[in-house]
Amino acid sequence: MKRVILVLAVALSTISVFAQDGKPKKNAEQRATIYVKELTTELNLTADQSSKIKAVQIESLTKLDTLKAKASAGDKKAGKKEAKATTEAANASIKAILTDEQKVKFDAWVEAKKEKMKNKEGGKGKGKKEEKEN
């Protein structure tokens, strides 16, 4: 009987360990701060530009969080379209804050981010296909 209880206790503790999410979710302000730090490094933003861009990002990320919550409950395609429109509007607002030289760097930075995401997603898919073939 003791062994059965011990086995159940170990099994339950193992399940609870795997059920935990490794990283706590960051809120919109924390993510905006990270974004602005990265942009400040890439584009040499002034303090005024950084604060304005952070405000734009907080607003955008808050909208995206709301859309994500709605999309999980309903139509995901419509949510993706709205999310893309929100991101494009945020990027347009950010470009309005930047100098002409910074706009060129920003466009290149955005494209690099998109490529990185495509490669990240593509790499995951390829690995799964290769595993299935073998």
Image (tube, rainbow, N blue to C red):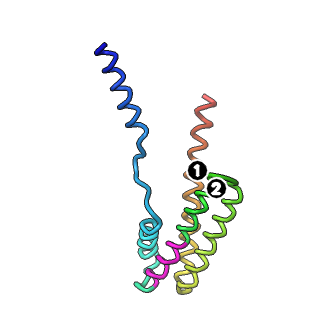
Which residue bears the numbered disc 2? 71
Question: 10 Å neighbourhood of mark 2: few (<14), some, or many (≥20)?
Answer: some
Characterize the magenta stretch by its predominant secondary structure.
helix
Of helix, strand and loop, which one carries label 2?
helix
- Magenta stretch containing residue 111, yes or no? no
75 vs 127, nearest the viewer: 75
Q: Which residue is drawn at 67% across and 65% down?
A: 82
Q: Is residue 107 left or right of residue 7?
A: right
Q: Residue at x 58, y 80 (%)?
A: 93
- Label whose residue precedes the other's in the sequence (1 or 2): 2
46 vs 107, nearest the viewer: 46
Q: Residue at x 54, y 63 (%)?
A: 113
Q: Position of residue 53 (x, y in %)?
A: 49, 78
Furthest residue in direction top, as rendered: 1
- Magenta stretch containing residue 55, yes or no? yes
Quadrant in the rendering for residue 42 = bottom left
Q: Position of residue 50 (x, y in %)?
A: 44, 80
Cβ atoms under marks 1 and 2 closer than 8 Å: no
Q: Give the range drawn in magenta.
A: 49-59
Q: In this view, does 12 lie to the left or right of 55?
A: left
**Looking at the picture, which amino acid does disc 2 mark?**
Ala
Which residue bears the numbered disc 1? 121
Dividing the image into 4 quarters, which one contains the C terminus? top right
Dividing the image into 4 quarters, which one contains the N terminus? top left
Q: In this view, does 75 lie above or below 130?
A: below
Question: 10 Å neighbourhood of mark 1: few (<14), some, or many (≥20)?
Answer: few
Residue 133 numbered mark, or none: none
Q: Which residue is drawn at 53% across and 86% down?
A: 99
**Looking at the picture, which amino acid does disc 1 mark?**
Glu
